[in-house]
Image (cartoon, rainbow, N blue to C red):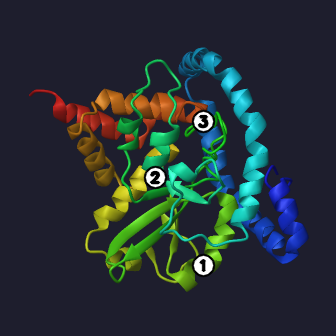
Amino acid sequence: KTYLSSKAFVKISDNDPTTAEKIKESWKTLVTSGQTKLKSRMAFSASHDSGVEVEIEQEQEQEQEQEQEHSILERDEISQMIARISFKFNNIVPNLDSPLKMEELSTHPHPFFQLNEGIAKAYVPILSSDPTDKTKIAKLFDANIKISLNIAPIHIDRVRLWGFNQREVDEVIVRFEDEERKVKDVTMVDLSEIDVWRFEQLRNGIKIYSLGQSQFIAHPSSKEEILGKLDNKQEFYRAIVQCKFFAGFLNYEEDEKPALKAWLKELMDSGWTVNELRDFFKKHILYYKVKSRQHFNESDIFAVFKEIEGELRPH
C-alpha cells in the first residue's frame, strides 16, 4: 500500500499506465505467494514461549531508547528521496560495471554501489558494544557484492546501513562471466526495481534470484542448469549467503550452509571472533527486526555459529 501510494508510483502511473498495471499485478502475485508462509510464521510466533518474548522485547526496548530521535530524523527525510530515486531508476537501465563512487555520493543519486565501499563510508554503530572500525565491517563482504541505493540511501544525511528505514531485500541480480562458468557479481535490489530487470534479464544475460525462495525467477533455465555450468558452485553460494547475512536472513538452504560456515570461519581467520560475529548479526543487523531477534536461537545461522563454536573448543 505504501509503494502504490508513493510519488514514484503515481508518476509511473501518469507516464506509463501499462507498466503501472504490471507492477500492481506483481504486487498481487507477491502477496498471494507469501500468505501461506506469513500464516505459518504468525502461528509459530503465537505458540512461542511468552516469557522469552517478554524478556527479549524488554531488552529491545531498552536498546532502542537511545535511537528514537535518530530514527525519527531518518524517517522524516527518507520517503521523499526514495520516491525520487525509484522514479529515476525506472527510467534507466544502469551499467552494473560502473557502481557509484563514494566521492560522488553527494553530487547525484545513483542506482547502486559496491557494498564494502558503502559500509566504509556510511556505517554507524547503534549500540555501545558495536564495532567502531568501519574498515573492519566493510571487509565482511566481498568486492563483488553490490546494493541498490533504493535499499540503503546512504547519500541522505543521518541515514545508515541497517538503519530504521532500510528496505527489505529478497531479489538479487546475478551476473556470470567466462561463458557463465564464473560468478561476476551479485547486486541486491529493491522490489520497486525488479520490473526493470525482468525486461533486461533475457536481453542482457543477467539473472534474477530470490533469496527467500532460493530460485532463479522468470528464467527459462532451471537453477540446476544454470549452476551446472559453473566451475565452482560454492562461489555462487558464497555470494548468496553474504547477501542473506546482510539482509538478516535466519534460515539457509542445505546447499548454502557449507558456504556460510566456510565464510564465517574465513572471517575469524582475519581477526573476528565467533562471539563478535554472532553479536554483530543479532544485535546490529537484526536491531530493527524484532521477530527475527526473538527466533534467532532457533535459526539455521544460530546452529552454524554453535557448530563453529563447538569445533573451536579444546577436546
Instruction: Give amino acid for label 2.
Output: Cys
Q: How far apart, in angstroms, are the residues tagged by discs 3 and 2?
A: 16 Å
Residue 33 in view, yes or no: no
Residue of label 3: 163
Q: Is residue 3 above or below residue 134?
A: below
Q: Which residue is mark 2?
A: 243
**Vertical side of 154 occupied by 221: above or below:** below
Seen from the viewer's position, the closer of residues 143 and 290 is 143
Earlier residue among tags 2 and 1: 1
Which badge, 3 or 2, comes first in the chain's sequence? 3
Element marked by disc 2: helix
Distance between the alpha carbons at the discs numbered 1 and 3: 30 Å
Q: Which mark is residue 200?
A: 1
Q: Residue furthest right?
A: 14
The answer for how far apart the CA atoms under marks 2 and 1 are is 22 Å
| Left or right: 282, with 261 as reference point | right
Whether pointer 2 and pointer 1 mark residues with C-beta atoms closer than 8 Å, the reply is no
